[in-house]
Amino acid sequence: EIVLTQSPATLSLSPGERGTLSCRASQNIGRNLGWYQQTPGQAPRLLIFDASNRATGIPARFSGRGSGTDFTLTISSLEPEDFAVYYCQLRSDWPTFGHGTKVEIK
Amino acid sequence: QVQLVQSGAEVKNPGASVKVSCKTSGYTFTTYGISWIRQAPGPGQGLEWMGWISPQSGNIKYSQHLQDRLTLTTDSSTTTAYMELTSLTSDDTATYYCARDQWEQPNFFHYWGQGTLVTVSS
């Protein structure tokens, strides 16, 4: 079973700062990785698929990169609505999610 | 626009079953699959993929963890997907989401339902 490990668990930043979130896979997964954002009381929202493609309507400040085992999600300049929990997801016959990174206001 | 609208919150006794519906609209039902994902309540609780169904092919995949208790079905006449979970325990207390998926196999989830809270308590 492939495990996704996200770090850090919590990221404390100020609005306008750059945020970098990490997701590491326990084995090579190519580019079969997506990123989601979840705010309290809401369903997750797909941000990035295939490691680096922005989903429909996602602002350009969100970018994804990586392949193989190491992936990052970067938010270039945090807006107030970006403070949320972020999950990575493996695309496979049995999808799995990382445990999440909470981006909180410093 | 694509919409997935789920049935309302449920409270169940331990040992009971629950069936959650996911009414879809805004796209051709049979050209996409549906996955179900759940999330236990409380801070730090992550997402757990439960299973996937293809209305077109009838193919189904279940999480090994839940396959003995989980049944996914669809009704193309009403463009609705259903998730039934049996032998409920307190560990099944969670918000359950349906999400539009690929028809061939699980993929990334571009559209989600609003979630259905299922509480298992005596």
Image: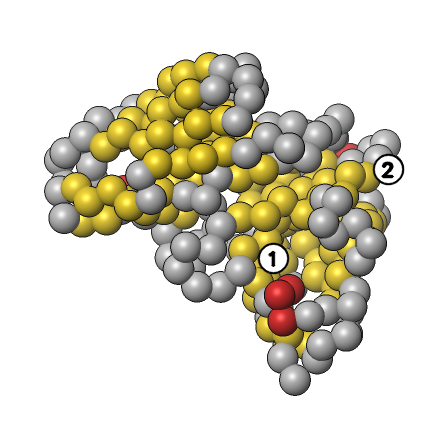
Q: Quadrant of residue B18?
A: bottom right
Q: How is the image coloured?
A: secondary structure
The answer to whether B104 appears left or right of A52 in the picture is right
Question: Mark 2 belongs to which subunit?
Answer: B
Q: Amino acid at mark 2?
A: Gly
The answer to whether B28 appears left or right of A102 in the picture is right
SS assignment at label 2: loop
State the residue at coordinates (63%, 79%): B121
Question: Where residue A17 sits: x, y (%)?
Answer: 14, 34
Q: Are marks 1 and 2 in contact (CB under 8 Å)?
A: no
Q: In what quadrant of the picture does the N terminus of chain A appear? A: top right
The residue nearer to you, when weighing B64 against B85, is: B64
Q: Amino acid at mark 1?
A: Tyr
Q: Is residue A9 above or below residue A89?
A: below
Question: Mark 1 belongs to which subunit?
Answer: B
Q: Residues within 10 Å of mark 2 (few under 14, many from 20)?
A: few
SS assignment at label 1: strand
State the residue at coordinates (82%, 45%): B76
Residue extending furthest toward the bottom: B122
State the residue at coordinates (36%, 24%): A72
**In this figure, which residue is indicated by the disc labeled 1?**
B96
**In this figure, which residue is indicated by the disc labeled 2?**
B58
| Residue A37 visible in this rendered orientation of the protein | no
Which of the two discs, 1 and 2, labels the residue nearer the N terminus?
A: 2
